[in-house]
Image (spheres, rainbow, N blue to C red):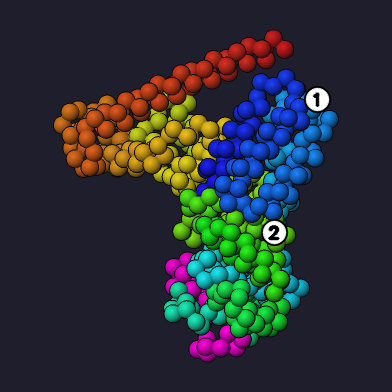
């Protein structure tokens, strides 16, 4: 989503490289470029103005002017201020009530993704050991309540679905159900409404009075633009939101409204939806998001994704096979499968420091297609062929190409890459043995 903004911001910092010392004129020139980049990305003009004023005060300080690396010094200032703009460096989690259940009201405009976000939040809570109950009070949109029930069934989540069509009554019954069963969270999917719709806003205020929620989360479509900022501001004035959930963060909109919402309302962004699947939902970490924006990577998120996707025992066994030069095409396929579990290739690579600038001229869709193609080729082999690729003669390669819907050239290319990888692993294994012998000699001398 933030590709254009990220590229322009990184360009600003590249222009400062090579300067022996940084002058106010350098700072002013950099801030002009940052202002243009943020405005083009649809960041609210007041947010841009306040942000740049804070950056300038810090950037012209003596600690920066005397810095040996001006580009890094200004980058640090921009990073720190951007983190504050998005809610600060402290991890924000859901507030809980002293009395169960803790009620979370999901509010926002129609079509912003409230129902899907409710199910995603419930799944995230279950993963953390909680027992949430979902309920929909949206009696206006056709099949809205059915949609939530369907999402619950698909993801093995509890949904309360009473017969009444009165929102206040639905919430009262859901509270009774939660307390009688022992649910610790009640997630309430409210009807989408415009902030100028007084009747529906009054209904939301009534639901707040009944449920006494610990959280009122405003669900904002990150592709909406400045209207999301205006709506969030009005919702905050009238019902008092406590946090923001950004949806459709995997889209290709400019994304500035997402940066503005937290700054304008003073409420932190707590979660972000990064895809259509139920698992594409994560706590929003300002430091990590800003790291990606500024090309600094996000190693912590990369590690977390790897831990979720990779089987530790299988990874250790694969490493041992590499050392013994027993790495097979089956192992190679398993690695491809686990890599694809981590998410889209561009998202994974953007978390690696310095990779974002290298990705500009790389066709990510081609990379994704190549990974799928390689998996299909290996799947079309017999178990014996995967374990002993040296038996793959011309006729076998033709059969594999036909079975995987690829060309023989693709099969040949994969086998060549695999042979090169095995050769490299063999040399690494020999190197580790040499190091072990050297270490034992030094141990003997001691």
Please say if the residues under marks 2 and 1 sit with CB atoms less than 8 Å apart.
Answer: no
Residue furthest to the top: 445
The numbered mark at residue 66 is 1
Residue at image position (28%, 39%) is: 377
Provide residue 227's location: percent of width, then percent of height. 58, 63
Image-based side of 54 in relation to 2, left or right:
right
Asked if residue 162 lies in the magenta stretch, the reply is yes
On screen, 65 above or below 375? Answer: above
Q: Give the structural element (helix, strand or loop) at label 1.
A: loop
Residue 405 vertical position relative to residue 418 in the rendered view, above or below = below
Residue 430 locus on image (x, y percent): 48, 18
Q: Is residue 317 magenta?
A: no
Q: Position of residue 105 (x, y in %)?
A: 63, 73
Q: Is residue 234 above or below residue 166?
A: above
Q: Is residue 107 visible?
A: yes
Q: Nearer the viewer, residue 103 or 322?
A: 103
Between residues 1 and 211, which one lies in front from this camera angle?
Answer: 1
Hey, which quadrant is residue 31 in on the image? top right
Q: Which residue is mark 2?
A: 264
Point out the stretch of residues depicted in magenta.
Answer: 148-170
Q: Measure the alpha-carbon separation of dots 2 and 1.
A: 34 Å
């Amino acid at each position: 989503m933030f590709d254009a903004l990220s590229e322009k911001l990184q360009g600003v910092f590249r222009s400062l490289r090579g300067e022996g010392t940084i002058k106010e004129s350098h700072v002013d020139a950099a801030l002009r470029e940052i202002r243009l980049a943020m405005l083009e990305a649809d960041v609210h003009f007041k947010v841009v103005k306040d942000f740049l004023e804070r950056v300038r005060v810090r950037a012209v300080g003596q600690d920066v002017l005397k810095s040996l690396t001006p580009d890094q010094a200004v980058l640090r200032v921009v990073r720190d201020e951007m983190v504050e703009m998005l809610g600060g460096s402290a991890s924000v989690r859901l507030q809980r009530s002293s009395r169960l259940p803790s009620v979370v009201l999901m509010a926002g405009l129609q079509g912003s993704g409230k129902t899907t976000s409710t199910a995603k939040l419930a799944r995230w809570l279950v993963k953390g050991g909680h027992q949430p109950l979902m309920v929909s009070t949206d009696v206006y949109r056709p099949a809205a309540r059915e949609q939530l029930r369907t999402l619950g069934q698909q993801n093995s989540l509890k949904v309360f679905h009473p017969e009444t069509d009165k929102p206040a009554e639905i919430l009262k019954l859901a509270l009774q159900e939660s307390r009688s069963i022992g649910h610790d969270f009640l997630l309430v999917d409210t009807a989408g409404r415009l902030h100028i719709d007084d009747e529906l806003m009054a209904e939301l205020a009534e639901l707040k009075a009944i449920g006494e929620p610990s959280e009122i989360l405003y669900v904002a479509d990150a592709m909406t633009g400045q209207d999301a900022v205006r709506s969030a501001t009005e919702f905050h004035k009238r019902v008092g939101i406590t946090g923001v959930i950004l949806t459709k963060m995997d889209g290709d909109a400019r994304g500035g409204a997402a940066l503005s919402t937290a700054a304008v309302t003073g409420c932190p962004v707590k979660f972000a939806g990064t895809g259509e699947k139920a698992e594409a939902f994560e706590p929003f970490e300002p430091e990590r998001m800003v790291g990606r924006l500024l090309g600094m990577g996000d190693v912590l998120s990369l590690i977390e994704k790897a831990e979720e996707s990779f089987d530790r025992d299988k990874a250790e066994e694969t490493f041992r096979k590499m050392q013994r030069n027993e790495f097979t095409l089956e192992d190679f396929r398993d690695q491809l499968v686990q890599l694809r579990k981590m998410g889209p290739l561009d998202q994974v690579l953007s978390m690696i420091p310095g990779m974002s600038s290298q990705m500009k001229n790389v066709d990510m869709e081609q990379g994704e297609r190549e990974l799928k193609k390689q998996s299909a080729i290996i799947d079309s082999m017999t178990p014996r062929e995967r374990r002993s690729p040296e038996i793959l003669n011309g006729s076998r390669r033709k059969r594999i190409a036909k079975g995987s819907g690829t060309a023989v050239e693709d099969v040949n290319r994969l086998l060549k890459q695999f042979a090169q990888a095995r050769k490299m692993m063999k040399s690494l294994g020999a190197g580790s043995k040499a190091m072990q012998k050297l270490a034992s000699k030094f141990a003997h001398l001691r």
